[in-house]
Amino acid sequence: MRVLMRNYSLMEAVKRLLPRPRKKIYNLGACFELVDIPKTSYNPSELSESKFLEYSNLSDKLHLREALGNIMIPRVVGSANHSIVRQYLVQSLRDLKWDVEVDSFHDHAPIMGKLHFHNIIARLNPKAERFLVLACHYDSKYMPGVEFLGATDSAVPCAMLLNLAYVLQDQLDSLKESKLSLMLLFFDGEEAFEEWGPKDSIYGARHLAKRWHHEGKLDSIDMLVLLDLLGAPDPAFYSFFENTESWYMRLQSVETRLAKFELLERYASSGIAQRDPTRYFQSQAMRSSFIEDDHIPFLRRNVPVLHLIPVPFPSVWHTPDDNESVIDYAATDNLALIIRLFTLEYLLGAK
Ligand SMILES: [Zn+2]
């Protein structure tokens, strides 16, 4: 993805926001417009304490690491590894009895020429009327001469989603027949091959949003939750979109409840020291920054979007150091737990 900000050229925006000492974010008042989130937008209905505690105990950290091991290989579109990772994702979800569709199409990319792309669409109930969609991208960036593993970008998010499906298989079982169900979306071709631009980036998301628009399927998406650049220590998230702010607040509330029950690992010592030291989901909205990512073609077609991407980006972003050494497993397990509980709350909380 890339970052654009009002009143700044792209290069200036990138210089200001991207790999940088994270404390500097506090000097960005001039280019970030941080506003307090109105409390009235929060929807207070949530999981009961007993359900919350029951679901909090569900985890399989070993499975998450195994999944990550299978995904975190160079997987540039068109390569043999790319097929291996795709088949692994598809088969793992089919083994868990998900309905899996592979959305294949051709497009032209700079340097590569004609490429065959494949989005992976997994649904618990393909006939559902509405879906909560959790998404990430599974391709890795083309970097000639370098072994780029894309740990945070986005092997960890992919592993988190697969792990969610594995860990919650019993809890999600009723969603195989319900009108509101869950969809996991693994986009292909998020990365640019030459230079990020409207025709060289988010190939899979552009294709799918357009296709579903023509098929009238976009209305069935309650909300698209896009995970990106996760796995590095001390992530800080902000609410980007007003129409999903109450759901962002729900993520924050899940984090707070878990912290209260001391169910987050190495939590008190993590976080940004100068503000909300123990918090990933910040209490601010970021309105003036604009991050281009797989959500854009959906956002432009009025699909509600929740973008879970840390600001600033991990310092290793788009460097060969985005490998296993950057992964903070405590933060990764904490975030995976928060996202699992959020998902259960969204889908089962009303029951
Ligand atoms: Zn990337």
Image (spheres, rainbow, N blue to C red):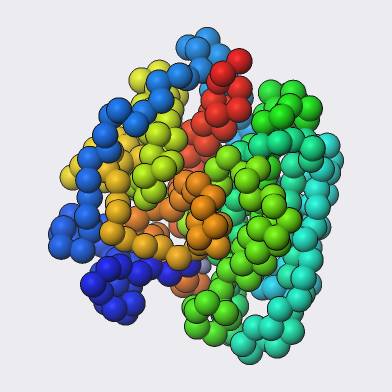
Position of 107 with respect to 249 (left or right) is right
Which quadrant of the structure image shows residue 179? top right
Q: Position of residue 189 (x, y in %)?
A: 64, 69
Which quadrant of the structure image shows residue 282? top left
Position of 255 with respect to 167 (left or right) is left
Is residue 68 visible to the viewer in this orientation of the structure?
A: no
Q: Nearer the viewer, residue 74 or 98?
A: 98
Position of 114 with respect to 205 (left or right) is right
Q: Position of residue 135 (x, y in %)?
A: 60, 50
> Which residue is painted at 50% across and 83% down in the image?
195
> Which residue is painted at 50% across and 12% down in the image?
48
Q: Nearer the viewer, residue 318 or 17?
A: 17
Is residue 126 visible to the viewer in this orientation of the structure?
A: yes
Q: Position of residue 127 (x, y in %)?
A: 79, 37
> Which residue is painted at 83% across and 37% down in the image?
97
In this rendering, the answer to whether 40 lies above or below 156 is: above
In this rendering, the answer to whether 327 lies above or below 178 is: below
Q: Nearer the viewer, residue 342 or 153?
A: 342
Q: Residue furthest top?
A: 50
Q: Position of residue 21 (x, y in %)?
A: 26, 62
Q: Quadrant of the C terminus?
A: top right
Count of labels shown? Answer: 0
> Which residue is painted at 79% across and 66% down in the image?
104
